[in-house]
Image (cartoon, rainbow, N blue to C red):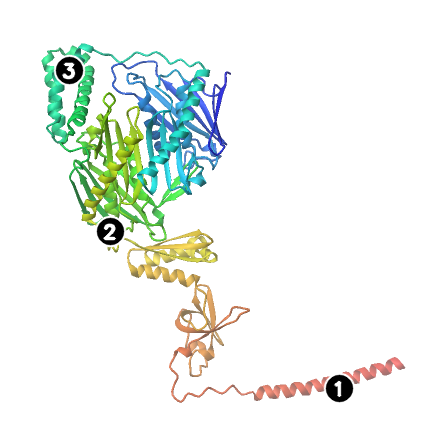
Amino acid sequence: MNIFTKQITLQDGRIITIETGKLAKQADGSVVLRCGNTMLLATVCSSKDSQPESDFMPLTVEYQEKYYSAGRVPGGFLKREGKPSEHEILTARLIDRALRPLFPKDYHNETFVNVFLISADNTEMPDSYAGLAASAAIAVSDVPFLEPIAECRVARIDGKFVINPTFEQNKKADIEIMVGATQENIMMVEGEMNEVSEQEMLDAIKFAHDAIKPMCALQVELAKEMNVTKREYEPEISDAELKAKIDSELYQKIYDTAKLALAKHERADAFDKIEQDFIESLGLTEEELEEKQILIDRYFNDSLRTAVRRLILDEGKRLDGRKTNEIRPIWCEVDYLPAVHGSAIFTRGETQSLSSVTLGTKLDEQIIDDVLDQSRKSFLLHYNFPPFATGEARASRGVSRREIGHGNLAHRALMKVMPPETENPYTVRVVSDILESNGSSSMATVCGGCLALMDAGVKIKKPVSGIAMGLITDTESDKFAVLSDILGDEDHLGDMDFKVAGTPDGITACQMDIKVDGLSYDILSKALKQANEGRAHILGIMLQTIDKPREDYKPFVPRIEKFTIGKDYIGAVIGPGGKNIQEIQAATNSVIVIDEVDGCGVVSVSASNSEDMKAAIAKIKSIVTEPEVGEVYKGVVKSVVEFGAFLEILPGKEGLLHVSEIDWKRIENVSDVLKEGDEVEVKCLDIDKKTGKLKLSRRVLLPKPEGYVEPQPRSNTRSNNNRSNNDRNNGERRNNNERRNNNNNDRRRN
C-alpha cells in the first residue's frame, strides 16, 4: 500500500489528519480524515462516460453517520441504517453547495461523493469536517476540479471566535455558522446568530476563511506528492456558427423584451416565442432539430443571461421594472383559517406563503434519535413546496431535500426569538405551504411564520423578517449591482443568492451561495447593509397587520399548566403501572406528562377547558400534599370501629376520627352515624411527630348547641372496686408467699 498522510493543527492544538491509500482504493479517490477519535471516510466516483449534450453537472453528494461509529444499534424494527435523517441531508447539502461551482463548466460526467462517519465520540462535531474530507477525496482523484475547498464551523463563545467547536462549546455560542471557501474566495455560508450585527457576521466569516486557507493548501500539497493527474474528458459539443447567429439575431430582441417588465409567466412565454420563431426560421427537419435543440437552448440561455445582466448593470432596470434596492408589493393577513390555532398569509410579489401554527402538548415533541444526538424538539417548522406553486403539472412525491433545507433556514431564523419553555409550555409546529413562488419562498416562510406565531398568541421576543439578496458582477469593468428581493430568474442568472433574516436589532439566520470567483468583503458588506434596509421595510408592513402577539390564545387552543412536585412524589402520582395517572386523565379528560428535571418533578397538565384543568391539578396536588394541622379536608370513611372511624383525607393519608369528635352530642354507636364510603368534612387537630398518626375532628366544624355542657367522663366506680380487689388479692398473695418461705426454711434446718 502506498499510504500518504498530511496533518494540520487547529488554533487550540487539535490535529486533523488526512490519510489516503489504505481504505476504498477502488474508488476514483478516497481519504480518511481524523480528529481525535472522530473519523470520516470520503470517496468520489465519476463516470468515464461523458454526457457532452448535457448542460448541467450531474453531481450527487451523500452524507451518512454510521451507528456503529458511536457504539450504538439503530432503533426501529430493521435495526440498520435507513433513509438519511434531516441532519444528514442538511450536511450533504452544505457539501454539495460548496463543491458544485468548482467542477469545470463543460464537465458533465455523472459524479458521486460519499462521506461516512465511521468513528465518533461526544466531543467533535463531525459535520464540521465533512466538506474538507469530500474535497480531499476529489483532490487525490483524477476527477477534474478547479481548486480544492474546505468547510469549517466558526462559533463565537464568550466573545472569542473558535474554529470547529466541540459539542459542549457550541452550546454556549451566540454566533454559529458553517463557511465553505477556496484559498481565495468564499463559496458558501449558512448559520444562526443571536441578533448580531452585520459587521460581527463579516468578522466571523473572515475568521473562518483564515482557518480554511491552510486546509486548502494541505490538499494541494497532498495531490502534488501523489503526482495526481486529472483525466481528460470529452467537452460539451459546440457550434460557434450557431452561437454567433443567435447572439446577432436574438440578443436585442431578448434585451427589449426584458425591459418590458412583464409578469413571470408572460415573460417566460415572450422569451419562448423569440426562441421558437428563431427555430422556425432555420427551416430544420425533425432529425436536424433534435440534434440542434440542446445547442439552441444553451446559446439562447447564454444570450438571455447576458442581456438581463447588461440591463441591470447599464440601466439599473430589472426584469419586473424595479430598481436594484426596491422591494416587491407586499400584503399580509392573519387569522385567515378560523379553526387553526394561528394562521397568516404573506404575499410578496408573486411569492406567497400560507403559514399555520399548531400548539400541542409535550407528547407532541419530536424525538431525535441520530447517532450523536438523542434529544427532543419542542419547536418545529415544516416547509412544503407543491408543484402548482410554479404552475407545474406533476405529482408531488414526498419531501424533497430542497424543502428540508429551506425549512431548516426558516427554523433557525424564528427559533432565536421563541420564548423559553418556562414561559411557553407548548410544543409549537409552524407549517408553511408555498402557494406561489417567484423567488425567496424561504424568506416568505420566515415572514409568514412570524405573523402566524403572533396570531396564535405565542410570546415571541421580537418579530422577524427575511429577504433574499442577489448580485450581478462584470469582472471586465468591475461593475456590480446588489439586488434586493430577487426574482427566481435573477437567482438563476445572477452570481449570488444571499438570504438574511433577523429582528430590528440583528441577524438571526443567514444562507449564502456564491456562483462566481472573487467576492470582495466590500461587496458583501454592501449586500448586508442593503439587506438590513430591505428587512426593515418588510417588517414595517408586517407590523401594520399585527404588531405584537395576541394577549391570549384562541378559545379552542388546549390549555397547559406546569408546576413542580417533589422527586419522591413522582412515583406516587404515576402509581403502579401508571394506574393513578391514567385514572386522573380519564376522569378529567386531560393529558398529564411528568419529567424529572434538576432533582424535582415537572408536571405538565393539558386540557381543553379550565374546569377539567383545575380538576386534574387538584387530584395531582392532593397526592403530593402533606396534611397540615388546622386544615380542613373532605375525607372518605374507609373503616368503622367501635371507638370511631378511619378516614382517608388525602390519597394514602388516613387519620382517626374518634367517636368523641364526631358530634357535640354523645354517640353510643358509631355505625349509626358513619358508614364506609361516606364523605365527611373534617379538620386536622394534631399529627403525632413520632408515628405520623392524624387526629381528626368533625364536631369542631359543626355549630355548638346552646347551653352545651361537656359530657362527664364515664363512672370510675368499677375501676376503683377493681383496684381494691387487686390490692386485697396482692396482699393475700404476699402472706401466702411468706408462709411458704418460712416452711421451706424450717425443712432446711431440720
Earlier sequence position, callout 3 versus callout 1: 3
Q: Work out whether 712 lies above or below 558.
A: below
Q: Which of the two residues, 438 or 318, is positioned nearer the viewer here?
A: 318
Binning the other alpha carbons within 10 Å of mark 3 as few (below 14), some (14 to 19) or many (20 upward) gives some
Residue 149 visible to the viewer: yes
Residue denoted by label 2: 548
Q: Work out whether 728 lies above or below 271.
A: below
- Which of the 4 image quarters holds residue 621? bottom left
Binning the other alpha carbons within 10 Å of mark 1 as few (below 14), some (14 to 19) or many (20 upward) gives few
Question: Label 2's element?
Answer: loop
Residue denoted by label 1: 735
Q: Which of the two residues, 695 or 67, is positioned nearer the viewer here?
A: 67
* Residue 495, position as x, y percentages in the image: 25, 26
Q: Amino acid at mark 2?
A: Lys
* Residue 66, position as x, y percentages in the image: 44, 31
Q: Work out whether 413 lies above or below 744.
A: above
Question: Label 1's element?
Answer: helix
**Marks 2 and 3, how far apart at CA:** 55 Å
Residue 401 visible to the viewer: no
- Which of the 4 image quarters holds residue 148? top left
Q: Amino acid at mark 1?
A: Asn
* Residue 335, position as x, y percentages in the image: 20, 49
Identity of the residue drawn at 19% across and 12% down: 291
Earlier sequence position, callout 2 versus callout 1: 2
Q: Amino acid at mark 3?
A: Ile
Residue denoted by label 3: 246
Question: Label 3's element?
Answer: helix
Closer to the camera: disc 3 or disc 1?
3
**Marks 2 and 1, how far apart at CA:** 101 Å
Quarter of the figure that contains the C terminus:
bottom right
Closer to the camera: disc 2 or disc 1?
2
